[in-house]
Image (cartoon, grey):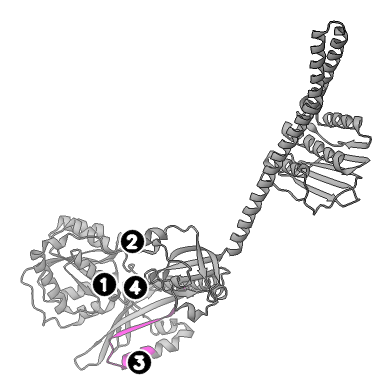
Amino acid sequence: MVMEVAHWTAFILWYHLKLYFMQAIQKELNILTVEDNPADLYLLQEMLKSTSLSIGELYTTDRISGARELLRTHSIDIVLLDLSLPDSLGIETFFGIKEAAADVPVIILTGLSDTSLALEAIKDGAQDYLVKGEFDENLLSKSIQYSLERTHNLEVLRQSNERYDMVIRATNDAIWDWNLATNEVFLVGDAYKKIFGYDIVNAVTPHQLWGNSLHPEDKNRVVHKLARFILDAGHHIWECEYRLRRADGTWAYVHDRGYMMFNLDGKPIRIIGSIQDITHRKRSEEIIMASEEKYRQMFYKNPFSAWIFDPETLQILEVNDAAIQKYGYSRHEFLLLNIMDIRAEAIPDFFQESQYPVTLNRNEPRLWRHKKKNGELLLAEITFYPIDYYGRTAIQVLSNDVTEKIRLQEELAQEQKRRQLQITEAVLGAQEKERSIIGGELHDNINQILATVKLYLDVAIAEPQPRMELLSKSRKNITSAIEEIRKLSKMLIAPSLKELGLKDSIDELLQNILIVKRMKIKLSTEGLNEETLSRDQKVTIYRIVQEQLNNILKYAEATTVSIQVKEKAGQISLLIADDGKGFDVNCRRKGVGITNIISRAELFNGKVEIDSAPGKGCRVKVVLNTRLSEVGEPKSRV
């Protein structure tokens, strides 16, 4: 026998207090009661009829739309208003009444848990509020009279701002009336049938129906509690939660609340109450409890350091195991700190009150410098966001130690900078090398030939006798100079790969080398499809082969060279091996040839592997990506 806490006491007092002690209100009042709960409406009507108020008409409705229509079509003197209706909820219910009739006084009927909201309603224009179960007919009569009087004197209170956000939802309660003298329980209305499925409407319940419907695990507790309540005449309110069996055999959680009445001798004679089905609430509570337990596990077992702090005092309220292990404080020590105590620098301005709400909407990570209990510093990537912490707003913080990550990033940046400098040096070295070659060829060869030609021509001009012989020699030397310039240009300018192709261009390069150097060179291009390669990719392969052959000619003293070019799975594999004297790959090299090869490979996200040792020859393997989508950050391994 359960009833919602906010409802019962008021109705019982209205119904049973002495009627002949009330002072009548001289003016007949038309009263509008806006209430959707059948139990509340029934008892409220009985109470109003039992007062000494001079009542003209009693109008009732269970919806705000019906109340607005009655206010529009009838003369209403006062409204008794429950804020929770099927078509309106909370403070909006009150506003709906005031919009329809701003000059009609409104008395709010509220539960014990809603008194603070009712006080807010007073500020917004309600004339008074009554806590259900905490007033009698005298207080009700006075409240109505005072409300009418205040209405005439305080017109400004009829216009107010929105105050309520939410009130208790309307419930369908099964009203019961237990006559202790006859031991009969009368069920009012059809709510009991709707809730529990028993065909009992406005009738006395079968004998022992309630007792037999109690859950076996709850029966002894509930029966003994009810017996103690009846024997203890000092208490008026009965309240208990338990389980009742429905007609279909399922179990419902119920909240039972009643009010005991006494005769003039102080003997209990009657209990009126109601039963509310709270099964859904109980299931929700179980889900919430499970959710809260899951959240606690997620918080305390989170591998990242986490804590919760008060946004006003910055005091730490909760801390997880990872933070205790990372920062070195015990849980008790942590709860004595605020977030300033673990920061290595001052708290930034976004903790100022004026900026704080805006900042909470930004959940991007921030980099803070923290200090551990032992004074060691760490860089922490912080993310924080507001949470509800036992009914108040608090801030949860997740801290990720990124000290090592930042260090590695800095090292990587330094390495990238070093590699860039190395590439720049290689490019500049290659340019200087080419300029040196060009300058040497021009000075030592072509310039000498042209100087000889000039000398011959000068003599031929001055001396007619050997003129023809000198002109013939000059012509021969000019032809030689042209040939030297052609060779020099051919060495510097990339071959016409579009016309010859990569394989033929490499063959031509090898033939030119074999003219001046006696060695065996073997070229293999098995499986190479040149049509899949761009011109830049072909030039890169050609230049790498040219660069390594120059290194072999200058330093290796090799007699045999093997060149293999293969294509597989979108990659070009180039292997150049020789049987020369080799070198130690760990020693710093003075030349820029290998660096140039690495730089060219990095342009196509390639990698270079060098295998060499003194007396063991050298193997240079280069792998290049041929698909443009695979070309990304340069990579190399030497």
Q: Label 4, label 1: how many angstroms apart (C-alpha)?
A: 25 Å
Left or right of residue 434, residue 468 in this image: right
Mark sitting on residue 354 = 2
Label 3: which residue?
Answer: 228
Q: Label 2, label 3: how many angstroms apart (C-alpha)?
A: 57 Å
Q: Which residues are magenta?
A: 225-250
Kind of element beneath mark 2: loop
Amino acid beneath label 3: Arg
Q: Which is in the foreground here, disc 1 or disc 2?
A: 2
Q: Is residue 240 magenta?
A: yes
Q: Which is in the foreground here, disc 1 or disc 3?
A: 1
Give whichever of 325, 276 is nearer the camera.
325
Q: Label 3, label 4: how many angstroms apart (C-alpha)?
A: 24 Å
Amino acid beneath label 4: Asp
Placement of 364 over or under 591, stated as above or below:
below
Which residue occupies 11% across, 82% down?
Answer: 21
Q: Label 1, label 3: how many angstroms apart (C-alpha)?
A: 33 Å
